[in-house]
Image: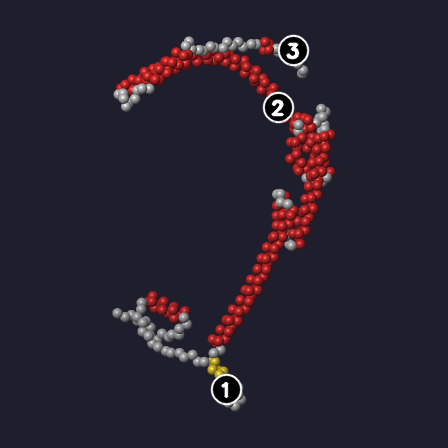
Amino acid sequence: MAIKEAEKVNALDSIEINYTPAVVSFNDFESFEKGVEEAVAWYSTFDLEVNTIEEVKQARTELNALDKKLEDRRKEIKREINDPYAKFENQYKIPYQKLKTLISELKNQIDGYEENQKMLRKDKVKHYFYEKAEEANLNKEVFDKYLDQFVKATEFTPTFNIKKSTQDKLDEIIIDEIQKQDQRDADLIAITDLCAKNNLGPASYIRQYDNGASLAEILGFINRDIEEIKRTRELNEAKRIADEKAQIERQAAIEAQAKEMVGTTIKAVNQETGEILERPVAVAKYETTIKFIMDLEQAKKFKTFLDENDYEFETLVGMKKVN
């Protein structure tokens, strides 16, 4: 509802707040200043090096009395000046607060309306972007980051349509995003092809690409990983060959040692046929009788020792108790 000029409340326009400046002055400032200088000059001569402690304390008491007299008067003047303003402010606050509250309420209404208009404009821009994105087979959410740039009323006509100049800006953004998508598709093909040729999964490289790495950087990462895998395979193959060779050498050494231990022979020649005869070398064995005096636990341990070390033995006489 429009407010006619004649209907406006104009009573406040004629209100005046009277103010008479307070006058605070010295009746004789020069005398005041001179009196302070004289007091400072007189009392500054008091010193414990030349005066007694009682005299210095008396000087301080007199100065405190002078200070209190001056400050009491200053505070009295200030209070007399402030009292009229305090009374005025108490009268002023209550009616003024009603006015201030109304202003705040109107502001809230306006802010709410403008925020609603802003959201309507944002939805209109969003609809424009999403419609074009669907036509171009683009991800709609890509355009969400641009919406807040076009929510001002200056981007729209009075009939709430998007201005032609604004539409041109939106189309430039759409074309740029289409080009970005085309470039992304081409880059992903290059990444996945290189991964496929080398039996690598592309997922981690695509994540790095989407996080801001360039195509050149991603291809560099892939080639680096390919070389690392190749090096690892070569090292593993070299290790496998070395392990096989070492195993063969160990087996040959074991077999040679076994032949040496088992096949130690004395060679003889058959005088009639000339045939070389072989017979195992006899290992000399000895028999001895040893008498041990031990307790039962020691006997068990001794028998275990003989068994574990392949000693041949025979019990001729069972154990008997000795003193």
Quarter of the figure with the N terminus: top right
Looking at the rendering, which quadrant does residue 287 occupy?
bottom left
Check disc 2 and give the amino acid type.
Answer: Asp
Q: Residue furthest bottom?
A: 272
Q: Which residue is mark 1?
A: 269
Question: SS at mark 3?
Answer: helix
How busy is the neighbourhood of tag 3: few (under 14 within 10 Å), some, or many (20 plus)?
Answer: few
Q: Is 116 in front, or is 215?
A: 215
Q: Amino acid at mark 3?
A: Glu
* Placement of 99 over or under 280, stated as above or below: above
Q: Nearer the viewer, residue 118 or 30?
A: 30
Residue at point 60%, 22% (across, down): 108
Q: Is residue 109 above or below residue 211?
A: above
Whichever of labels 1 and 3 marks the residue nearer the N terminus, that label is 3
Number of labels in the image equals 3
Instruction: Measure the C-alpha gap from mark 3 to mark 2.
Output: 26 Å
Q: Which residue is mark 3?
A: 7
Label 2, on which residue? 111
Mark 2 or mark 1, which is nearer the start of the sequence?
2
**x and y percentages locating residue 221 in the rendered image:** 61, 50
User: CB atoms at circles 1 and 2 under 8 Å apart?
Assistant: no
Residue 288, x across and y down, in percent = 35, 77
**Of helix, strand and loop, which one carries label 1?**
strand
- Label 1 vs label 2: CA separation? 125 Å
Give whichever of discs 3 and 2 has the lower sequence position.
3
User: At numbered mark 2, what does the secondary structure look like: helix, strand or loop?
Assistant: helix
Q: Foreground residue, 35 or 84?
A: 35
Q: Amino acid at mark 1?
A: Val
